[in-house]
């Protein structure tokens, strides 16, 4: 049943061609070079691959690019089956039949693929193409570049028109496709300039490494939130695709502290369980001092451009790595959230450990555990009124800042139900 249908449709197609119905025009107008006994070169190689694909014998042809007796006999056999008359001369009718191969981009027969690859590599000087019978991304890109050069549809698929151009066009150099690889320092600075990846060739990535204070550069990844690197500076990039490579950073404090991988509950337990906070001296044994990056106005002059500064903060060891990460994320915010300089005390208002009781009570404040931090106290005061909101100032805690602490599992005093403590962020409270 299948064979009968196929034969019927072939006869119909032939009838359409013979009567020169307008929509058969593309097949009718394609012209092909004539090959015959004595011909040689790249087109003869392609012919031999195609004859071997059809497999009508009498023998499997040696691939020598030379149109001799064996090739003549194979052409005659093919013509007898597919494209009479059987004269051994390869003209338009025979080429059209030889290249009438159903194909898709994902599945391609070995010999037709080799014919395509041979022509791309040897007739069109596309050196990245291997004649391996495997229709991968390099071959597809080479076909697309060839189509671009010929001014025909660029789809990377070898249909009748592309076959015709591959066989008919004169030998010439076709430039491969190229892709742009750009770099994003992802919060750091010193990203390398963009590079050009040529399809089919391995690109050596720039050896330039970006930097970020308190962070170690791990490498590059195609996602800005990747935790590990896919590519290394100076390493290889082989994909035939454009990409933006983002720096992957690891906090120095995170990498050097064993409790970096603790769960939230482990950290809370570590802050409180079995620890003696009965005196300031005992509480201080649970602390470490970290240096964080901040933005500030010179002399609190908000008419000037913000500048970068640092602040040393005493914080509980169990959450010091998290805290450094939090403050770096705050620092990296596009708005460059500014920290107020308290000239009365001579410090930037990022205040951690303080051995004191809670406001209006006798129990220890989370500051006494080194588990709380106040930001810009001058402009974000404590109020016993839970709905209190400070008036607008550049130092007012923003949603972005509060969300960063929240994402790390911290609480914000601006959300307390019994009071408002806008300056106050704490862990485990
Ligand atoms: Zn506080």
Image: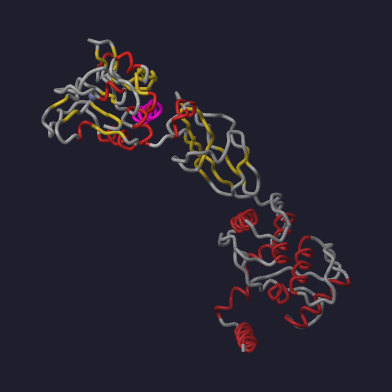
Residue 331 in sight here: no
In which quadrant of the rendered image does the C terminus lie?
A: top left
- Please report the residue visible at 66 percent of the width from the left and 52 percent of the height from the top: 174
Q: Percent from the top left, x then y, of residue 169? A: 69, 61
The image position of residue 233, as x and y in percent, is 58, 33
Residue 43 quadrant = bottom right
In which of the image's four quarters is ligand 1 placed? top left
Question: Is 52 or 217 nearer to us in this picture?
Answer: 217
In the picture shown, does residue 263 fall above or below 43?
Answer: above
Q: What residue occupies the far front of the structure in this picture?
A: 274
Q: Which residues are magenta?
A: 320-332
Seen from the viewer's position, the closer of residues 417 and 22 is: 417
Residue 323 is covered by the magenta coloring: yes
Q: Residue at x 73, y 66 (%)?
A: 111
Figure check: 355 above or below 175: above
Q: Which quadrant, please, contains the N terminus?
A: bottom right
In this view of the protein, can residue 287 be seen by the observer? yes
Check the image and tell me how it is coloured: secondary structure
Q: Residue 230: which quarter of the image?
A: top right
* Dominant secondary-structure state across the stretch colored magenta: helix
- Looking at the picture, tell me which residue is in the foreground, 321 or 179: 321
The reply, left or right, for residue 376 in relation to residue 113 is: left
Q: Is residue 148 magenta?
A: no
The mark tally for this picture is 0
**Residue 356, position as x, y percentages in the image:** 23, 18
């Amino acid at each position: 049943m299948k064979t009968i249908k196929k034969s019927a449709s072939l006869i119909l197609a032939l009838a359409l061609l013979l009567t020169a119905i307008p929509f058969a025009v593309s097949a009718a107008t394609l012209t092909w070079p004539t090959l015959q006994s004595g011909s040689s070169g790249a087109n003869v190689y392609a012919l031999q691959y195609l004859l071997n694909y059809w497999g009508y014998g009498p023998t499997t042809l040696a691939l020598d690019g030379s149109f001799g007796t064996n090739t003549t006999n194979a052409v005659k056999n093919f013509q007898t089956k597919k494209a009479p008359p059987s004269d051994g001369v390869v003209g338009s009718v025979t080429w059209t039949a030889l290249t009438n191969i159903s194909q898709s981009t994902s599945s391609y027969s070995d010999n037709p693929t080799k014919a395509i690859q041979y022509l791309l590599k040897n007739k069109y000087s596309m050196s990245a193409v291997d004649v391996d019978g495997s229709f991968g991304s390099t071959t597809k890109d080479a076909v697309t570049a060839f189509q671009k050069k010929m001014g025909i549809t660029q789809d990377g698929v070898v249909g009748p028109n592309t076959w015709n151009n591959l066989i008919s066009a004169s030998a010439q150099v076709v430039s491969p496709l190229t892709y742009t690889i750009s770099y994003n320092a992802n919060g750091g600075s010193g990203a390398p300039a963009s590079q050009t990846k040529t399809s089919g060739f391995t690109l050596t990535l720039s050896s330039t490494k970006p930097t970020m204070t308190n962070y170690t550069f791990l490498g590059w990844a195609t996602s800005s939130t990747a935790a590990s690197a896919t590519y290394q500076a100076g390493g290889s990039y082989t994909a035939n695709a454009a990409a933006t490579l983002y720096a992957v950073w690891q906090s120095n404090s995170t990498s050097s502290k064993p409790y970096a991988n603790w769960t939230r509950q482990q950290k809370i337990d570590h802050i409180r369980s079995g620890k003696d906070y009965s005196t300031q001296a005992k509480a201080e044994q649970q602390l470490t001092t970290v240096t964080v990056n901040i933005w500030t106005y010179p002399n609190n002059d908000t008419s000037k451009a913000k500048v970068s500064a640092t602040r040393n903060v005493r914080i509980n060891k169990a959450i010091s790595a998290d805290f450094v990460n939090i403050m770096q994320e705050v620092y990296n915010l596009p708005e460059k959230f500014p920290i107020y300089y308290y000239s009365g005390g001579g410090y930037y208002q990022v205040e951690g450990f303080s051995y004191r009781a809670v406001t209006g009570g006798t129990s220890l404040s989370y500051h006494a555990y080194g588990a709380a931090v106040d930001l810009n106290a001058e402009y974000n005061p404590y109020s016993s009124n839970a709905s209190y909101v400070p008036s607008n100032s550049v130092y007012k805690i923003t949603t972005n800042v509060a969300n960063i602490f929240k994402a790390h599992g911290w609480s914000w005093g601006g959300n307390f139900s019994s009071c408002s403590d806008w300056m106050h962020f704490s862990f485990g409270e």
